[in-house]
Amino acid sequence: MNNEALLVEEADKGSANASFLEIVDVQTGKREVIAEFGYVIEAPNWTSDGRSLIYNSDGKLFIFDLGSKESKRIDTGFAVRCNNDHVLSPDNDRIAISHATAEDNKSRIYVLGMGDGNPVLLTPMGPSYLHGWSPDGHTLAYCAERNGQYDIYTIPAVGGVERQLTDSPGLDDGPEYSPDGQYIWFNSVRSGLMQIWRMKADGSEQTQMTKDESNSWFPHLSPDGKLTAYIAYRKGDVAPGDHPPCKEVEIRLMPSEGGAYRTIVNLFGGQGTLNVNSWSPDSKKLAFVSYRIRKAEEASNL
């Protein structure tokens, strides 16, 4: 379908009421809308067998079969206030989620077997927002607020003591491991605008990887380790530390050793579009979500 032909209010105000689950070929830039929803979905993960995508909507997780084009809810037990920070284990047997707990409405990280409905708490302190799982399966990386400051932390995947890796003033977010496990990529506002950074997995050698006039978020490494995808907001459209939905944004690619970027998608999106790694296993495609604000009469017909 041609989603550009829809009657849409292109104002960047209000809430999206139409979501498009899309796939883009990173070589050709060809986009394909594979499903349309009359509500908000977010943050697709591609499963390692290449057959399904996992996304969140209304606090719950779903698995979308790319063959049948059907969605099925994943059993997460009591964790029904999940946000868009969910990551599959390297073997795809487990999933780690960020769930807003009832006692204080703060996000905390849990791990459960895929669909077993038994979340196990990993981060007693909140808020904690998951973003990365080490390739060896041993460690999770996340953004957390502690004492008024948001920094990057890691914690053993079986639970234990968290370790703080960054301490610069301002927001550090979106930590994700490189496929070889040597680096953690993240985004940081420490330079004034939100930019892409990387550091060694132990927190050393923190290095700025983008230096441009955009606010860039959520670096995602391709499985072959060659490319980094991320979301970029135009300077002035958002505060550097904010990543709202319903903005004109770009999905960009840059070499994982640094260098010039290229834009592969321009879209109406932002928060929810590409929060977690959504590379296909063969490193040839990205899954993402774009949004529309439909006119009332059109939305009522969905």
Image (spheres, rainbow, N blue to C red):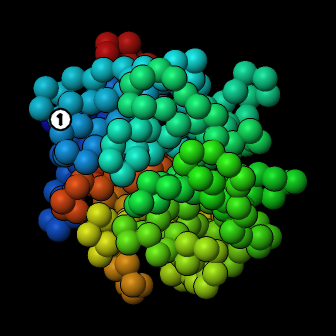
User: Between 98 and 160, which is closer to the camera in this rendering?
Assistant: 160
Q: Is residue 297 above or below residue 170?
A: above
Rate crowding at label 1 as few (under 14), some (14 to 19) or many (20 or more) other CA atoms within 10 Å.
some
User: Between 210 and 50, which is closer to the camera in this rendering?
Assistant: 50
x and y percentages locating residue 126 in the rendered image: 75, 41
User: Between 242 and 92, which is closer to the camera in this rendering?
Assistant: 92
x and y percentages locating residue 237 in the rendered image: 59, 59
Q: Is residue 236 left or right of residue 274?
A: right
Residue drawn at point x = 46 percent, y = 59 percent? 134
In the displayed orientation, state which residue is furthest to the top.
300
Q: Is residue 82 above or below residue 148?
A: above
Q: Is residue 281 left or right of residue 88?
A: left
Could one spot residue 239 in this view of the protein? Answer: no
Please tell me how many numbered marks the rendered image carries. Answer: 1
In the displayed orientation, state which residue is furthest to the left.
67
Q: Which quarter of the rendered picture does the C terminus lie within?
A: top left
Q: Is residue 106 left or right of residue 138?
A: right
Residue drawn at point x = 28 percent, y = 43 percent? 47
Res 152 → quadrant = bottom right
x and y percentages locating residue 184 in the rendered image: 52, 69
x and y percentages locating residue 151 in the rendered image: 72, 61
> Secondary structure under badge 1?
loop
Could one spot residue 102 in this view of the protein? Answer: yes
Residue drawn at point x = 50 percent, y = 55 percent? 138
Amino acid beneath label 1: Leu
Res 43 → quadrant = top left
Q: Which quarter of the rendered picture does the N terminus lie within?
A: top left
Kindly identify which residue carries mark 1.
66
In the displayed orientation, state which residue is furthest to the right.
147
